[in-house]
Amino acid sequence: MTNVAVIGAQWGDEGKGKVVDWLASRADIVVRFQGGHNAGHTLVVGNQTYKLSLLPSGVVRGKLGIIGNGVVVDPDALLAEIARVRAQGMDVGPETLRIAENATLILPLHPALDKAREAARGESKIGTTGRGIGPAYEDKVARRAIRVCDLAEPETMSDKLDELLLHHNTLLRGLGAETFEKQALLDKLLALAPQILPFAEPVWERLDEARRAGKRILFEGAQGLMLDVDHGTYPYVTSSNTVAATAASGAGIAPSAIGFVLGIAKAYTTRVGSGPFPTELHDATGELLGTRGFEFGTVTGRKRRCGWFDAAMVRQAVKVGGITGLALTKIDVLDGLEELKIGVGYNIDGKMYTHLPAGQRAQAKATPVYETMEGWSGITRGARSWGDLPAQAIKYIRRVEELVEAPVTLLSTSPERDDTILMRDPFEG
Ligand code: IMP
């Protein structure tokens, strides 16, 4: 028995929701360790559909949910999400949800700055979710952030607000955006305090106890490896580290406690927001993938850019992210395509690369080097065993495994929970 960390191996939206939900039903505790309410996924439990952004998936399965210190928490968004889930009949309270006392808070000035900066960037915008994620992480690193524990200390909040407003109002004014008043923010935080503090605790202690008691812990990553602030397509990335190693620092647990790292990758590639995407398709096949895969963002509703599976990129994610096994999702979207392409490297100014170099210009110029494979005429949709798969689909999966240098340990063949083929149970290590 081991713990499991689930991380995206592409640019997010890899279909983590279904896999995490399935694993959450078998875990004792589900922990979010990075990101914030920029993440989003839809869970169908019985006849209810839950849209979660900040709450760990396990809470709708009645499991203990933990929001780790590595998450940036927007208290308004959190309370609204809790209210939504409660209205659907789910019991979410301090008994089922714990929040790290040292997690950073997102304040109203963070989305304001996020949006003002994006507007000022014009054509070169990052395409953020506008939720204030980047500015909140900046404040954390700059040592001026207000954290969950500060809600119990009005004077600390008052002092920190002085420093925060000096910084933010100067920027907002420069960007021609509205500024913020200290008293209004302080009153807001004082009103939020009794609603948030009952959830707060040193979660590392609870995790340590759980670990010693042999409980199964599921670490639920958000976004994807190519959105990692260090390893992704910088600057077109999110503001946190999305690699599995972050589960340790973002929850307060030993790296050795992370266990099996399950990387999630779609059988093709998508991306929302701006930035390089070498295997992107601007043709009818790209449109087809988007329509069949229902590729629209859960959080912002934006249409996702679509393209072929980029094995060079996923291989990089496997190496950098420490991925033990891969869950390949949405293979059914490829059903019936005559020919399939897999990106195996990049051509940049006539030079061949088997990985995406870090330079921004190099990434923008990268054109994919493809391997072409025959498609399959049978269907993978709804397959529940290896034997149900067309031979050519198995060939495709085997080739993916070879190229990314990791085994496919789980295959998802439709949005339905049971349409899953499990080759290796991650909790068994
Ligand atoms: P931010 O995280 O809102 O700062 O956005 C930075 C980049 O990450 C943008 O390209 C977003 O579209 C992308 N992003 C953030 N969260 C997600 C996610 O959950 N799925 C996919 N893309 C995301």
Image (cartoon, rainbow, N blue to C red):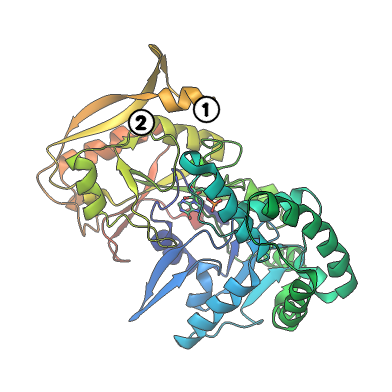
Residue 402 tag number: 2
For mark 2, does the 10 Å Cα neighbourhood hold few (<14), some (14 to 19), or many (20 or more) residues? some
Question: Which type of secondary structure does the marked residue at label 2 adopt?
Answer: helix
N-terminal of the pair, mark 2 or mark 1, is 1
Question: Which type of secondary structure does the marked residue at label 1 adopt?
Answer: helix
C-alpha span from label 2 to label 1:
28 Å
Q: Identify the residue at horizontal 17%, vertical 42% (top origin).
A: 284
Tell me if residue 254 comes above or below residue 321 in the rendering: below
Q: Is residue 268 visible?
A: no
- Amino acid type, label 2: Glu
Q: Position of residue 300 (x, y in %)?
A: 43, 60
Q: Position of residue 107 (x, y in %)?
A: 68, 65
Q: Position of residue 325 (x, y in %)?
A: 45, 44
Tell me if residue 243 comes above or below residue 25 in the rendering: above
Q: Image quadrant of residue 110?
A: bottom right
Q: Identify the residue at horizontal 22%, vertical 54% (top origin).
A: 291
62 displayed left or right of 287:
right
Mark 1 = which residue?
A: 360
- Amino acid type, label 1: Gln
Q: Is mark 2 within 8 Å of ligand 1?
A: no
